[in-house]
Image (tube, helix red, strand yellow):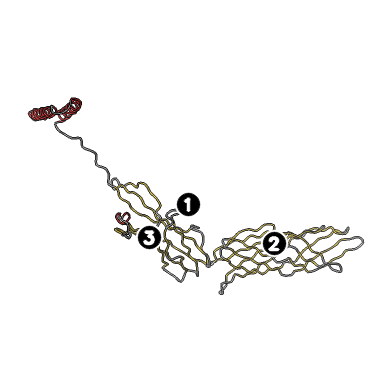
Amino acid sequence: MQAIDKNFDSVKVLYTNARRRLRAVNPAHRRHRIFMALVLVLTFGSTGFSLPVQAATAATEFRFFMTAKKVRGNAAICVGDNVRIRVQVMRAEVVISPGNLGYIQNLPGALVTGSVSNVSVGTLQPASIRTGFYSIDPGGAEFQFHADKVGTTSISFKGTINHIWWASKYLIGLPALTDRTDFVTDQVGITVEQCQYKVMAISHFSTAGVKLLAIMDGVLIKNEDGNLTGTAAVNWIGGPVTLGGCNGTMEVAPGQATLVGEQAGEQLIVDVTYHETTLGHLYNCIPGSVEIHPPVIPDPVSVTVPVSGGDIFGKDQNLSAPCYMCEEYDMSGFVNVDVTRVVQH
């Protein structure tokens, strides 16, 4: 109670002194100042001179992060592949208490360098690059790893973020000076395997009254010289034949094909060369029957697919079949080709 009385006495002294000073001021200003003095009296009198205390704001700081990922994710990496690796540098405003991540943004202009732990497995290009300023991919950089041989390795990335001293940004003629540097890192594991390609081609041939189906199934394997080669079995499906008033059947003996592959950048060129085989053609005619066995050979086929594999549909292909004791005739047709890449174990 005594403390309140002392506070009130002090307020009265302040009010009296304020009134004395207001006598020398014009009436309009005097009324305004009297009003403010009354507000102070009421405020201080009700609170005992206690000023309102503002809540302390949480401290924040900027922290930096990096991510490095293979574009194809967990897809198999084969000898000869070029693997794209995306690196992203980001900045986040961190609220230290209670430790929340605030606004996150991609950070352009950061210098990122990469190094391969086992250089015999493959090489990285470029050695360093700055994160981009492009609006479609700010803060991003792309590297490419070329797989040279079977094995495992890791690629380490390091990002450098330089903080420019604020004064050097505005003082004309002063070079940009760094007052702080932050570093971010990430790592990508690489496993390179020997791969092979399964190649399947289904050919459809036909002419007047005749239909044939050829199914080729083979494998392309990379040899010691780095060339893709292989062989394939070719199995045929014939059927009933109606020709010149004669009914009969047509069959073709199993055959073979040679496969050759060539990698050109991100494309694989596959060439299929068929070997000659024998057609068995039996005519049941009246009054007699005729049986012929001419050689047949499908046209070679060349297709281009991605190195990861692919399909080609409806490619033109003909079948050459010379007729016994008559003119040679060709069967027109088409072929569907499927190329699938698998890890060689």
Task: Out of 291 and 214, give the one closest to the viewer.
Answer: 214
Residue type of the residue flagged with mark 3: Gly
Quadrant that contains the N terminus: top left
The residue at the point 58 percent across, 66 percent down is 264
The earlier-in-sequence mark between 1 and 3 is 1
Provide the residue designation for mark 2.
215
Q: Residue at x 75, y 63 (%)?
A: 318
Residue 139 falls in image quadrant: bottom left
Tell me residue 16's x, y (percent).
Answer: 10, 27
The crowding category of the residue bearing disc 2, from other C-alpha atoms within 10 Å (few below 14, some 14 to 19, many at least 20), is some
Which residue sits furthest right? Answer: 287
Find residue 132 and report its image quarter: bottom left
Q: Mark 1, mark 3: which one is toward the viewer?
A: 1
- Judge from the rendering whether residue 171 lies leftward or rightward of residue 264; answer left or right: left
Q: Position of residue 219 (x, y in %)?
A: 62, 66
Which callout, 2 or 1, points to the residue nearer the camera? 1
Choose between 336 and 85: the one closer to the eye: 85
Q: Which residue is mark 1?
A: 136
Q: Secondary structure at mark 2?
A: strand
How far is mark 1 from mark 3, CA to CA?
A: 20 Å
The residue that mark 3 highlights is 159
Residue type of the residue flagged with mark 2: Ile
Q: Nearer the viewer, residue 101 or 139?
A: 139
**x then y, percent, for residue 327:** 85, 67
